Amino acid sequence: MKIQKFTFNDFMENTYVLYDETLECVVVDPGCNTKKEEDLLSGFIEKNKLVVKILFNTHCHIDHILGNAFVAETYNVPLSSHKGEIPVLEAGEMVSNMYGIQYKASPDMTMFYEENDLLEFGNTQLKVLFTPGHSPASISLYTKGILIGGDVLFDNSIGRTDLPGGDHATLIKSIKEKLFVLPDDTIVYCGHGPETNIGKEKQFNPFLQ
């Protein structure tokens, strides 16, 4: 599996395109909300002749869903996430107004993933890990050596828990019980900032000692 990262919007959110040799791909957390950002994403997909099969949100905070409508409409794909994120998704318009952000309303979520489900495209399978705490029902995606973690774990930090539906104790439990059991060399692709790895965060992350 190959991974292309884009950093979009004023929140510096990381959007990922996951693809393999079949040229099927998944768009994870599209944060694009300007024409320039939309063109960067679609240009990469078109240049590499990728076929978008799944639109996926690790969670539905506003910075991760700004491009949902664009991707869904451009590639005719349904939105998928955990059903526990529906209230967060539905609050998108209110939150965008609060921040003064341009936002085209996301389509409804119609595909649902839960713990231990497999997200499949091409020849690739990613295991779904239920990792709430930053948001009510965040999910992470794991395949050997790679974790797509949303805003659960960052380089030397963790996701904030002061937004509605967040809970610090739940987040710490998610990280220690779901992520820290993965091999130390697992690369973590975060929702913001640079990549890290499980071993480094187990040893040095100040929030998890």
Image (cartoon, rainbow, N blue to C red):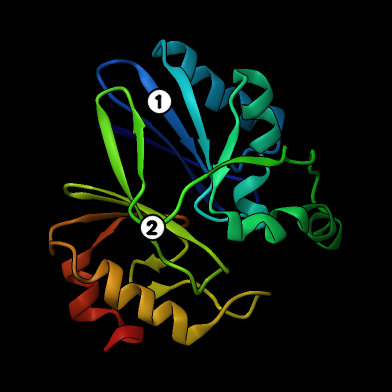
Q: Quadrant of the N terminus?
A: top left
Q: Secondary structure at mark 1?
A: strand
Q: Secondary structure at mark 2?
A: loop
The 10 Å Cα crowd at callout 1, few under 14, some 14 to 19, many 20 or more, is: many
| Residue 102 horizontal side relative to residue 153, left or right | right
Find disc 1 in the rendering and name its residue.
25
Amino acid type, label 1? Cys
The 10 Å Cα crowd at callout 2, few under 14, some 14 to 19, many 20 or more, is: some
Q: Closer to us: mark 1 or mark 2?
A: 2
Q: Residue at the spot x=76%, y=54% of the render? A: 90
Q: Which mark is residue 88?
A: none
Find disc 2 in the rendering and name its residue.
115
Q: Is residue 99 visible?
A: yes
The x and y percentages for residue 25 are: 40, 25
- Against 35, residue 84 (above or below) is below
The x and y percentages for residue 169 are: 45, 87
Choose between 142 and 39: the one closer to the eye: 142
The x and y percentages for residue 77 are: 58, 25
3D distance between C-alphas at marks 1 and 2? 21 Å
Check if mark 1's residue and mark 2's residue have beta carbons within 8 Å: no
| Residue 101 horizontal side relative to residue 147, left or right | right
The x and y percentages for residue 208 are: 31, 84
Choose between 145 and 191: the one closer to the eye: 145
Q: Quadrant of the C terminus?
A: bottom left
Image quadrant assignment for residue 80:
top right
Q: Residue at the spot x=86%, y=56% of the render? A: 97
Amino acid type, label 2? Glu
Q: Is residue 149 visible?
A: no
| Marks 1 and 2, the one that precedes in the sequence | 1
| Residue 7 horizontal side relative to residue 107, left or right | left
Q: Residue at the spot x=19%, y=69% of the render? A: 181
- Against 183, residue 202 (above or below) is below
